[in-house]
Amino acid sequence: MKSTVLVAMSAVIGIAFGGSALAQNPAFTNIKIENAYTRATAPGQQVAGGFLKIDNKGNADQLIGASSPAAGEVQLHEMAMDGNVMKMRQVKDIAVPADGSVELKPGGYHLMFMNLKGPFVAGQTVPVKLKFAKAGEMELKLPVNAVGAK
């Protein structure tokens, strides 16, 4: 009898609290990441870009942040023309359209790794956590490509 009650209580707790854990798990969202990478850096280099395609099969969302243990800070950036000059600036979020995609690529939106804790070495990976307004957090590893590779 006690074991039946214990199993029933475990099931109720799992159902009650399981939803919030599932909502944060990328396997249960409509967001998929494709073609993710960063580039190798030189020793002492303090910044690096991160690039990827966000494919969304659900409702509109926003990428609102990113973090990595490989950098002191990860910012969302955009490159845009200001008159005749290409400028880079930090943005607070990147819109991810419903049933669409957005690409973070050189010369456009990208992740900006700041205050690197060590060089990014070709052939290795960099762990990154992306934070979406609705889909929650998604962890992934960006392959480090050699400079000049795509």
Image: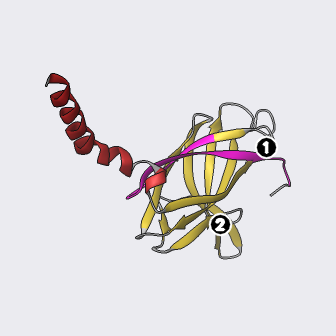
Q: What residue would you read off at disc 1? A: 40
Amino acid type, residue under disc 1 in the picture: Ala
> Which is more toward the observer, 107 or 19?
19
In the shown orientation, is residue 123 left or right of residue 101?
right
**Residue 125: % across, % down:** 70, 40
Which label was assigned to residue 108? 2
- Which SS class for mark 2? loop
Q: What range of the chain is rendered magenta?
A: 127-148
Give the residue displayed 56% in from the left and 45% down from the top. 74
Give the number of marks. Answer: 2
Give the residue displayed 48% in from the left and 75% down from the top. 99
**Residue 94: % across, % down:** 50, 63
Give above or below for 3 relative to 91.
Answer: above
* Label 1 Cα crowd, 10 Å radius (few <14 / some 14-19 / many 20+): many
Quarter of the image where one finds residue 18: top left
**Residue 110: % across, % down:** 62, 58
> Which is more toward the observer, 20 or 120?
20
